[in-house]
Amino acid sequence: MSLSEAPPPHHEVPYPGGAYPETHPSHLYTLGRLLGLDTAHPRQCRYLELGCGNGSNLWSMAELWPEAEFAGMDLSARQIAHGREVAEAAELTNLSLVHADILDYEPEGDFDYIVAHGVYAWVPGAVQERILALVAKCLRPNGIAYVSYNALPGCVFRKINRDLAHFHAAAIHNPWDRMKQARAIVEFVSESVPESSAMYRGVMAGETERLRSVTDDYLLHDDFAEFNTPLYFHEVVNQAAKHGLSYLGDAAFEDTQYVNVSETVKERLRPAGRLRYEQYLDFITGRAFRKTLLVHAHHDPSGGVVKSVVESTSLRTRLKPASEAPDLRSTSPEKFNAPTGLVLSMTAPVAKAALVLLAARGAGPTPFSVLVDLARAAAGSLAPRSEDAAELADLLMDLYGGGAIELVGPHPAVATRVGARPRAPRVARHLTRLGPGTVNLLHENIRIDEMFNRAVLSLVDGENDLHTIAEILRPAVVAGALRFPADQTTLEAAVQNALAMLCGNGLLHAEEG
C-alpha cells in the first residue's frame, strides 16, 4: 500500500486513539516473566509501535520512563504531526514519531517490545507479511511483539453489516455522510428482518446494538474500513511461524484461561496440543478479538506459568466487599462483588483481609510483600509468614486468571491521598487542555467531562497547593467563565473535591518520602 493509495478516511478522520494498557511495557514485562521469558525492564527498554496513529499510546509511556526509548510510525502525516506537537509540549525527548509507509519503513536498531495494535487485520496481505518480517528482524532475543486483530469465528457476523454498509454507501465520498447512511441502512435492515427468521433477526439485532455503542470515527477505521479481514488464530500463528516467530500467550491473561468453559471440555481438548487447544476454544467461545504475543521461535512457552512472579508485582482489584464490616478473623464466608456482576465468596481470613485492603486502596497498586504483612495483621494470623504468602500468591494467581485481580508491573508510585502540593503527569495535564480525555499513571484512559475538574488538573504541577489553585481559578469563576459543581458550597471545597477525584482515578503521583 503506497502513500498515494491510502484510503482517504485515514487522513480525513483521525483514528480515535488513546492508551492501550495491555501494550504498556510494564504489563508486557510482567506477563513475559509470568510466562517464563526474561523480558527487559521498562526502565531502559526500547519500544516500537507500528501504526501508532498520533502516538497517543506512547505519550504517557515516554514521560513515565524517561530513560527508555520509544518510537512510533504511521501512514498518516496529519496524525504524526499532531503527535509531535503533543510530544514537544510535554517535553518527551525520548519519543520519535515517523511518517512512513510500512512497506518502506526501516526502524533504527532493535527493540525489546514491538506493538501493532489495530493494524494487522486492516491491511493487505503484503503489509501483514511486512509487519511480521519487521518483528522477526528487529525484535531482540528476549523481546515480545504484540499483534492484535479481529478474530474468527466471533467476527463472522460483523461482515454482514460491513458488506451492507459498503453496498449501500459506496458512492458517498464524504466520510461523515457515509457513516450516516451506513448506520441508517443497518438500522433499517435490522428492523425489517421478519420474525419468522428468528436466528438471523437475533444476529442482526445484536450487531446493530453493538454499532450503536461506538463512534463514527471508530467505525470508519474498524468495521467499515477499506480493509478488514478477521483471521483465525491458527492462521496468524502459521503466518508468524514462517518468519521464525512463535506464540507466547495473550496480552489479556484471563482470555487464555477460558473461565466460562467447563473443565470437562478443556480436559477433553488439551491432548490436541496448546495451539489447537486455543483454536478449538475460540470456536467454542466465539472469540472476536485477539491480542497475540509473539516471540522468537527458540523460546519454549510450554513450561507453564511461573506463579512466583506474583510475589514481585503490585496488585489492584475492582472487587468490593459486600459487607460494610466484613469479618476478617474467622472462616465465616464473606462476599466480594465485581463490576461485571460476578460475586466471589472467601473464607480464609488472610485472603479476605487482602481483598478488603486492595479494595480500599482504589487505583493505587499495593506491592505483594506489603499486602501480605497488612493482611496478616488485619486477620490476626499466627501462621508462618511463608505459609500465608504462598497461599495468598496461589489465590491471587487464580483471581488474576479470572480477571478479578490485576497484576501491576513496575510503575511510578500512585497517590492514595491528596498531598500538600499534588502533581499530575505533564502529558495528563496537557491533554486536559485539549479535551475531556486524558491518561493516568497506570496508562488507563480517563475521561473528565467537568470543565472545572479539567481546569484543576491543568494546574496540578507539584508547585501549587490547594489554596494557590483556588486563587488562580477565582477570577475565571467570578467572571462566570468557569463554574464549579453546584453541589460544592465554596471554591476551595470544589478544588478539594476535584483533587480527590483525580487521586481516585490514579492521576496523582505519590509524594516522595
Image: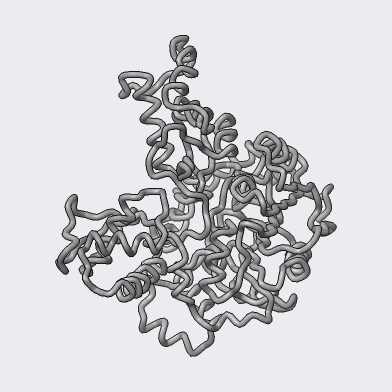
Please determine whether, in this image, residue 457 is positioned above or below residue 414.
above
Q: Residue at x 77, y 42 (%)?
A: 77
Q: Nearer the viewer, residue 459 or 152?
A: 459
Q: Residue at x 85, y 57 (%)?
A: 104
Where is residue 169? Give x, y as percent: 65, 44
* Quarter-of-image position of residue 369: bottom left
Which image quarter holds the N terminus?
A: bottom right
Where is residue 66? Give x, y as percent: 65, 48
Where is residue 333? Give x, y as percent: 17, 66
Q: Is residue 35 left or right of residue 264?
A: right
Which image quarter holds the C terminus?
A: top left
* Quarter-of-image position of residue 310: bottom left
Asked if one can make out residue 510 in the rendered structure from this viewpoint, the answer is yes
Q: Nearer the viewer, residue 351 or 378?
A: 378
How many numbered discs sit on the rendered protein?
0
Q: Nearer the viewer, residue 206 or 21?
A: 21
Q: Is residue 351 left or right of residue 418?
A: left
Q: What colouring style does the render use?
A: one colour
